[in-house]
Amino acid sequence: MTALSSLKIDCYLSDDAHLLLKSVQLIGAAWIGPSWLSKLELQIPLDMFDRVVASAPVFQHLEMLVLTLTRGYLHITKENATIRSLSENVAGFVNKKCNRTASLSIKFPYFPMTIDPLFASVMAMPRLSDLSLVLPTYYLKVHDLMGLHAFLTTHAQKLHTLSLGFDHTHEGHYDPAPESIFSHPVFSIPFPDLSSLTLQGGASKLTRRGYTEFLSVYLSLFRPTLRHLLIPGHIFSYRQFIHLITPLAGENSILQLLKVDIQYLQCQLVLFLSRNFPRLEELHISFAFPREDDPGTLVLQPNDDAAQFDDLMLSYTKRFCDTIETQDYSRWRLRKLHMKFLSLDPDDTSYEATRHYISFKQSIAKALPSVISFNGENRETFTATSA
């Protein structure tokens, strides 16, 4: 155990409870002695957490702590006082054994009501610079999550990396109005040294209309410091994306990495990025296919056959390639381009599998002379693999 640098312990609800208790004894024996762990991942039912970590040493060299707290074998409701007690057990473990970790990730699948009692009990972590958590949207009301608000406020000056997920998938609960969610005080906390921000999970049908506007306002808080922005999990239209990203745009923008999902790849989007994000070095973009006009609504219909799809791809690809090859990207610093192809309809053929992807790859590579890596491949391999 003393030689380990990374350890992951998973306890699933499907596991036999008796076998799990025996495993706890083995884990307890393994904890004996000083630890040199730099990364610890624990996925443990909340009601068994204290027994699993009871004999754990103080992790003096821990750099990353990942906690996934599941419901466990108890039937616990929001009103049950047991929630607070069990959450405080987790907080006690963090306070006593992992307080000097630099990176903390906490997930609450199917059990989000533990989030506030836990953060209300976690003490200040002097080295914390990287925080990742999922926010249950139906708890995002002004009077809720004040423990989390206090925790974020305490650590705001030192956080460099922040990842926030939005969880809308809780049976029997409904999201409050978008204004209630996105006006929560946790989204007003300034992080003066934040350089990397991930906002994942997108928006539910109810909150979708307020999500783009929220992002536009929220991102404006980080313009002076933000270098990495990742917003996966929600497919934006061209207009939505331009609206939300504009607060970070301009010749003085320092953004270096961007990850986004968008309906269609358009030349005007690539041109906008090159002109407004001159220091962008790495772009991760997911899209259905290249397209030159902004369609507003999807043209493909459920009954369209393969031949119709192929004709559409031929038309879209030709217009995209003809346009992008006439545009000048020679001054753009982009070095890495990662493209992923979305399917807007489960029955659609992925654009990547069509014959038109060949000419698309050749045109995009020709237009972007500064890029040295396309989907992890060098220029020669990328343009040759489908030739």
Image: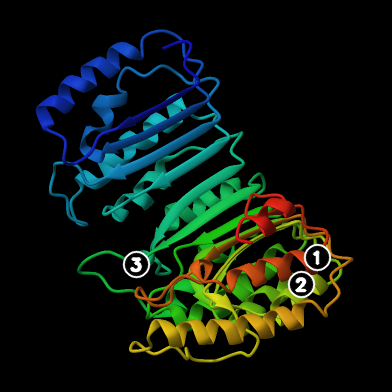
Count of marks, rendered view: 3
Tell me which amino acid carries mark 3: His
Q: Distance between the Cα atoms at labels 3 and 1?
A: 33 Å
Asked which secondary structure carries label 3, the reply is loop
Circle number at residue 168: 3
Residue at 50% x, 30% y is 99
> What crowding class fits label 3: few (fewer than 14 Cα within 10 Å), some (14-19), or many (20 or more)?
many
Q: Distance between the Cα atoms at labels 1 and 2?
A: 6 Å
Q: Are marks 1 and 2 in contact (CB under 8 Å)?
A: yes
User: Relative to the observer, which residue lies in front, 76 or 303?
Assistant: 303
Task: Let me know if residue 374 appears in the view.
Answer: yes
| Vertical placement of residue 77 versus 119, above or below | below
| Vertical placement of residue 96 versus 242, above or below | above
Residue at 65% x, 86% y is 292
Query: Which residue carries the number 1 mark?
Result: 253
Circle number at residue 249: 2
Question: What is the x, y in percent for residue 336?
Answer: 71, 55
